[in-house]
């Protein structure tokens, strides 16, 4: 019976996007679920539309609506979390970042966002019970669909079906239009080559991880390096409860490091809000009962993270200042990524019995001989504080690791300068003295 409903709603992409009007708010979902065929069809209509406001985020490719002549005359892009693609759209003058703690995003849609006129995103093929699975983007899609006046699903046979149990899909009777897309392969997120700095930082973190720990890995080279070194260790009985599911978790499962047997909740299940990686990841999560796709207000809820003993949170940073403030999302006023779930996991890990949160970063950055320190006296003007100084626990560079909990301002300055690059330590001491957070005995 559901196939009759399916065919009743099946239309061409061009027909589906005719529902979009000037002034509308259109939602593209997130990450690998962004639409393709319907995005292309909407781009073809943009010349007749104005003031269309599109929400998306963690963009893996440039949307077709961004390739039309003078995009800013027709629409604005609003990103929940920035990748290089989102940053480029912002730099071009028709994109903006939408600040949030990622755990709050479903609630934003249900309580704070005025309207969603049209939602359009890729889904897996309909199952026998009439459901379209959201794939590795459970995140907040159910909340989007609840608020949307019109829901368009774009079927991609390459989209894996991610199991979960709640808010992981939408029924055909709740869909307005179905578009059968071109079935492109899912966008892949390649893991970069590990540097010596990545390995040094990862080694110091792995030393702090006990058997039976529950892992959250952020995106980037250093969290990936931690996964690699865990694979080379003797750690066992690890669990997963993470915002983003990445290739490292697949590798660790295949290496026998992860089984979820020690998790206090969702035992034997690897729980996540969204995922992106290589084809290996998409094949692994498809119809896999040991992997659990959940809305982000379940995954990132500080109270739920705290329920998991020995929770280990590992995330990157752009800068850390001598007061212990962490900026992980901007460099000055230039938006780089977003708050995401970093603050949620920093707080949740510390509340966990035996839990630890790690902010990791290389001690320096820069090109063409202009090396700069990532540990700075105060954050670059305009930089956003992602994790406040009162929340931060461990900070790690290739020169060491320090726990800031319980430390006064001078103790924090001393600890952070001790893991800064040696070339910058004297300058940092002079600045600490100027700011009156340095004791002479520290030398």
Image (cartoon, grey):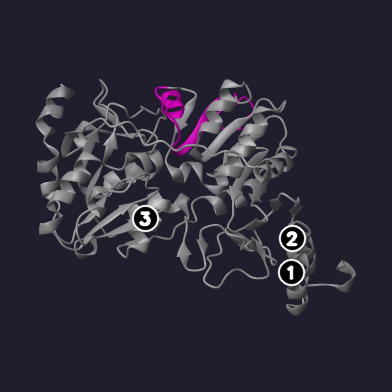
Quick one: quadrant of the C terminus? bottom right
- Identify the residue position indicated by label 2 in the image: 416
Percent coordinates x, y for residue 19 in the rendering: 12, 49
Residue 154 figure quarter: top left
Give the magenta-colored segment's residue range: 259-287
User: Disc 3 to disc 2, how far (Cα)?
Assistant: 33 Å
Residue 76 drawn at (x, y percent): 27, 61
Horizontal relation, residue 111 to residue 351: left or right = left
Q: Is residue 267 magenta?
A: yes
Helix, strand or loop at label 2? It is: helix
Circle nearer the viewer, 2 or 1: 1
Magenta residue check for 93: no
Mark nearer the N terminus (3 vs 2) = 3
For mark 3, what is the residue? 79
Which residue lies at the image location 37% right of the left edge and 63% below the top edge?
91
- Disc 1: which residue: 428
Q: Is residue 426 left or right of residue 302?
A: right
Q: Secondary structure at mark 1?
A: helix
Say whether disc 2 or disc 1 marks the residue closer to the N-terminus: 2
First reached walking from the N terminus: tag 3 or tag 1: 3
> Residues at badges 3 and 2 in contact (C-beta under 8 Å)?
no
Q: CA distance from mark 2 to mark 1?
A: 10 Å
């Amino acid at each position: 019976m559901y196939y009759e409903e399916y065919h009743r709603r099946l239309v061409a992409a061009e027909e589906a996007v005719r529902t979009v009007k000037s002034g509308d708010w259109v939602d593209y979902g997130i990450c690998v679920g962004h639409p393709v065929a319907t995005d292309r069809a909407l781009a073809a209509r943009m010349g007749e539309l104005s003031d269309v406001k599109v929400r998306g985020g963690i963009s893996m490719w440039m949307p077709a609506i961004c390739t039309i002549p003078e995009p800013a005359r027709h629409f604005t892009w609003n990103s929940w979390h920035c990748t290089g693609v989102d940053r480029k759209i912002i730099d071009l003058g028709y994109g903006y970042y939408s600040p949030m703690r990622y755990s709050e995003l479903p609630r934003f849609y249900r309580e704070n966002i005025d309207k969603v006129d049209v939602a359009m995103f890729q889904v897996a093929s309909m199952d026998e019970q009439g459901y379209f699975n959201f794939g590795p983007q459970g995140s907040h899609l159910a909340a989007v669909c609840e608020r949307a006046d019109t829901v368009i699903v774009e079927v991609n046979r390459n989209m894996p079906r991610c199991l979960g149990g709640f808010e992981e899909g939408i029924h055909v009777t709740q869909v307005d239009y179905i578009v059968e897309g071109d079935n492109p392969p899912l966008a892949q997120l390649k893991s970069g080559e590990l540097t010596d700095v990545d390995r040094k930082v990862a080694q110091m973190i792995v030393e702090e991880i006990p058997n039976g720990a529950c892992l959250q890995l952020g995106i980037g080279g250093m969290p990936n390096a931690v996964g690699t070194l865990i694979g080379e260790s003797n750690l066992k009985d690890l669990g997963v409860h993470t915002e983003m599911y990445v290739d490292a978790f697949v590798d660790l499962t295949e290496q026998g490091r992860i089984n979820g047997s020690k998790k206090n909740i969702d035992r034997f299940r690897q729980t996540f809000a969204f995922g992106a990686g290589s084809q290996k990841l998409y094949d692994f999560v498809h119809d896999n009962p040991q992997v659990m796709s959940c809305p982000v207000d379940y995954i990132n809820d500080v109270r739920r993270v705290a329920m998991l003993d020995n929770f280990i949170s590992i995330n990157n940073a752009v800068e850390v200042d001598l007061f212990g403030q962490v900026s992980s999302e901007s460099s000055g006023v230039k938006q780089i990524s977003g708050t995401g779930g970093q603050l949620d996991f920093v707080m949740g890990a510390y509340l966990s019995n035996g839990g630890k949160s790690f902010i990791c970063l290389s001690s320096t950055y820069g090109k063409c001989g202009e090396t700069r320190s990532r540990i700075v006296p105060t954050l670059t003007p305009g930089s956003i504080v992602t994790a406040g100084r009162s929340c931060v626990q461990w900070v790690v560079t290739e020169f060491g690791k320090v726990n800031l909990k319980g430390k006064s301002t001078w103790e924090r300055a001393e600890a952070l300068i001790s893991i800064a690059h040696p070339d910058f330590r004297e300058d940092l001491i002079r600045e600490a003295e100027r700011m009156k957070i340095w004791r002479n005995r520290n030398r």
